Image: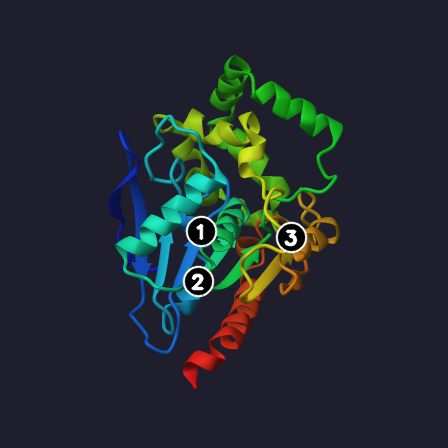
Amino acid sequence: MNNTAKDQYFLWQFAPEQEAKIRYQEFGENNENTTPLLFLHGYGGMIEHWDLNIPEFTHDHKIYAMDLIGFGKSEKPNVRYSLELFASQIETFLYLKKLDSVIIVGHSMGAASGVYFAHHQPEKIKALILVNPSGLFGDTMDGMNTLFFGLVASPLIGEMLLAAFANPVAVGQSLMPTYYNQSKVDDKLINQFTLPLQDKGAQYSYLSPSKRPLDFRLDHLAKPCNYKGPAFLVWGSEDSALPPNKIIPEFQQLLPQAGAYILPKASHCSHHDAHEEFNKRLAWILELIEVPAAQ
């Protein structure tokens, strides 16, 4: 990642008596011919998970990236985590930075948060670029996963599992299935994903999708949703957790205007797994989006 980007923080009062310290970074210079980009990581992720992508686009775009509440270096309070909460964080950040319009580049849970926000405030979004988005699962939740999530939802068992998971060996094992190019799962990546798990309050955010899965789903949104602007789905062909052949049709019911692009030899973390191919596709998408603004 660009070494000149420093951690910045803002204090977000998300409820009358609740607040959290949120980390973000800025890259590049303001450009009147292009729309700012906002990068949003997936479940368990952080700003650094975009380290092979963001530097490629700082010459032409002002770029923002932030850690969602409960993840990365953002504070992890005991609150009800949900796509609605993350969307509220997006709204606050746009207000803080006086941004009238952004292009969201979101991965997995970050992508689902972007969709949720765009549905409720479509006028704020120039385009959605959704990388292996979660939120719609079709029939991919098999019996074993259902049983596992039921166990995790038990407070005692869930916290025991989190404690057992919060070490480099377990994190490495969990990351491996999300990568086709497993050499990318190196010590640096593993440490990036391990450290936030050891933070105070990590159990609240990390266990919330399994304790309250409906809070992280998009099923309840109208189909098509309220957002009618440009939308793009970028998917790793080898994503076994969210297989593109099953999930893309569901997202195209929500966003019928969305074009879909499959990245070969990439799994769930396709932006990092096959970063060169992803960056080429993202550059092509951004050029397509920004043609009217540049004229």
Residue 67 in view of the camera: no
Q: Amino acid at mark 1?
A: Leu
* Residue at image mark 3: 223
Task: Give the CA distance from mark 2 to mark 3.
Answer: 18 Å
Residue 276, given in percent of the width and then of the height, sits at 54, 65
Residue 246, given in percent of the width and then of the height, sits at 74, 49
Res. 217 image quadrant:
top right
Q: Secondary structure at mark 2?
A: helix
Tell me what residue is drawn at x 29 percent, y 71 percent.
30
* Residue at image mark 2: 123
Residue 242 in view of the camera: yes
Front one among 213 and 176: 213
* Residue at image mark 1: 40
Sequence-first disc among 2 and 3: 2
Sequence-first disc among 1 and 2: 1
Task: Give the CA distance from mark 1 to mark 3.
Answer: 23 Å
Q: How is the image coloured?
A: rainbow
Pair 1/2: label in front = 2
Q: Amino acid at mark 2?
A: Glu
